[in-house]
Image (cartoon, grey):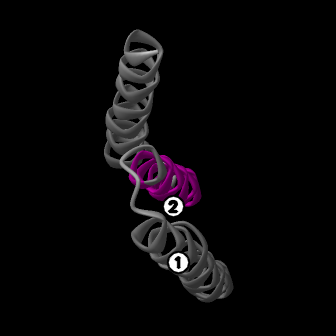
Amino acid sequence: MMAALFSLNTLVVIGIVVTAIIAVVSDKILSSVIALGITGAFVALEFIILHAPDVAISEAAVGAVLSTALFVIAVRKTTKKEDEEK
């Protein structure tokens, strides 16, 4: 049982690291925002594994959903202005 939990924990941490690197390295802003939202979802999953459901719910609501939605709205509004200026 502990080996399965350890391997699941390792996979989630690898997912956090990989999606965070994708968020930093990606050339497109929207791809970076989506990768950042996936990173927040992985972090919320890690909190569930660590038996902290209250923190996991907060992270899922703020880190994965709210901040991603705000960033997507900001990217959409700023790219429209750039397209109109050209």
Give left or right: position of 69 versus 42. right
Q: Position of residue 24 (x, y in %)?
A: 32, 47
CA distance for labels 2 and 1: 7 Å
Q: Is residue 63 left or right of residue 14?
A: right
Furthest residue toward top: 3
**Tag 1 secondary structure:** helix
The secondary structure that most of the magenta stretch takes on is helix
Q: Is residue 16 left or right of residue 38?
A: left
Q: Residue beneath label 1, please?
A: 71
9 relative to 19, above or below: above
Q: Position of residue 6 (x, y in %)?
A: 35, 20
The part of the chain drawn in magenta is 29-47
Which callout, 2 or 1, points at the residue further toward the start of the chain? Answer: 2
Residue nearest the observer in this picture, 66 or 23: 66
Identify which residue, 27 or 67, lies in the foreground: 67
**Image point (38%, 29%), residue name:** 9
Quadrant where the C terminus lies?
bottom right
Q: Position of residue 79 (x, y in %)?
A: 60, 77
Image quadrant in which you'd find residue 26: top left
How packed mark 2 is, by other alpha carbons closer than 10 Å (few <14, some 14-19, many 20 or more), is many
- Determine which residue is flagged by label 2: 33
Between residues 15 and 86, which one lies in front from this camera angle? 15
Using the image, tell me which numbered label, if any, was put on residue 35: none
Is mark 2 in CB contact (under 8 Å) with mark 1?
Answer: yes
Badge 2 element: helix
